[in-house]
Image: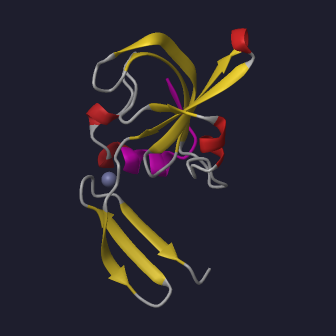
């Protein structure tokens, strides 16, 4: 169940990312994988930018329908790039396990380029991304 943080971004994401890549019931989102704490620190999935939505989920299957050995449950955060992470609090182990996912593993093609400006569009999902390095 999602709580929407940014409705405008959320609406865009709904029309950009294919339905089958989103988490659904007990099925994890696409490209869902556990990483170490150190990897999470350097992953750039968590940034200073806000996330578009947050939710609590329990997964028993990966996106390709393989069963997990143990149920994965925790809080999910997703940003407007369709990238996100889940924090699994394992109280019984006094440990936090981080999971990453990507609704699309973007492959951007440059659509516009000027001095300090770059604009691209993902070949797979059509996601638009712009970087203005003069800011
Ligand atoms: Zn994409």
Residue 54 position within the rendered picture, expressed as x and y whole percent measured from the top left: 57, 34
Residue at screen point 49% across, 23% down: 1
Foreground residue, 58 or 15? 58
- Would you place residue 44 above or below residue 135 in this image? above
Where does the C terminus fall, quadrant-wise? bottom right
Foreground residue, 50 or 70? 70
Residue 77 position within the rendered picture, expressed as x and y whole percent measured from the top left: 56, 37
- Would you place residue 86 above or below residue 39 in this image? above
Residue at screen point 53% across, 45% down: 52
Residue at screen point 41% across, 88% down: 114
Farthest left residue in view: 123
Foreground residue, 22 or 30? 30
Residue 127: name its quadrant.
bottom left
Residue 72 position within the rendered picture, expressed as x and y whole percent measured from the top left: 51, 17
Q: Is residue 10 magenta?
A: yes
Q: How is the image coloured?
A: secondary structure
Looking at the rendering, the stretch of residues picked out in magenta corresponds to: 1-13
Count the marks.
0
Q: Is residue 34 magenta?
A: no
Residue 40 position within the rendered picture, expressed as x and y whole percent measured from the top left: 61, 42
Farthest right residue in view: 94
Residue at screen point 38% across, 36% down: 31
Residue 3: name its quadrant.
top right
């Amino acid at each position: 169940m999602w709580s929407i943080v940014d409705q405008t971004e959320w609406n865009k994401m709904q029309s950009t990312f294919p339905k089958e890549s989103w988490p659904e019931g007990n099925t994890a989102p696409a490209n869902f994988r556990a990483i170490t704490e150190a990897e999470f620190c350097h992953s750039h999935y968590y940034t200073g930018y806000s996330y578009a939505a947050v939710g609590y989920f329990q997964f028993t299957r990966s996106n390709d329908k393989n069963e997990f050995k143990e149920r994965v449950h925790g809080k999910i955060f997703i940003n407007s790039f369709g990238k996100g992470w889940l924090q699994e609090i394992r109280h019984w182990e006094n440990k936090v396990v981080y999971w990453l996912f990507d609704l699309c593993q973007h492959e951007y093609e440059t659509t516009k380029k000027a001095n300090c400006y770059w604009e691209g569009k993902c070949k797979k999902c059509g996601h638009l991304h712009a970087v203005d390095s003069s800011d």
